[in-house]
Image (cartoon, rainbow, N blue to C red):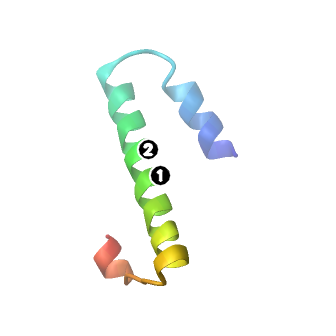
């Protein structure tokens, strides 16, 4: 996964910018995972306009 390796390389230091990048990454991952689980377990589909 080149994106994950890039993230690890760019966010080694504890600067505010790096914390914001990590926060954005985690929020994005959470929302993608949440949508995936909703589609699988509840058979509920959102349009791309509702997600974004």
For the point 44% across and 62% down, the residue is: 34
Q: Between 41 and 48, which is closer to the camera in this rendering?
A: 41
- Mark 1–mark 2 Cα distance, whole angstroms, equals 6 Å
Q: Between 12 and 40, which is closer to the camera in this rendering?
A: 40
Q: Is residue 9 above or below residue 48?
A: above
In this image, 6 relative to 36: left or right? right
For the point 52% across and 27% down, the residue is: 10
For the point 30% across and 22% down, the residue is: 16
Residue 18 screen position, x and y as percent? 39, 27
Q: Between 31 and 12, which is closer to the camera in this rendering?
A: 31
Q: Between 45 and 51, which is closer to the camera in this rendering?
A: 45
Residue 30 screen position, x and y as percent? 43, 52
The residue pinned by badge 2 equals: 25
State the quadrant of the C terminus: bottom left
The residue pinned by badge 1 equals: 29
In the rendering, which numbered label is found on residue 52?
none
């Amino acid at each position: 996964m080149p994106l994950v390796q890039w993230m690890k390389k760019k966010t080694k230091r504890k600067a505010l910018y790096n914390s914001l990048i990590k926060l954005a990454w985690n929020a994005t991952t959470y929302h993608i995972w949440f949508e995936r689980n909703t589609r699988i377990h509840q058979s509920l589909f959102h349009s791309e306009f509702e997600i974004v």
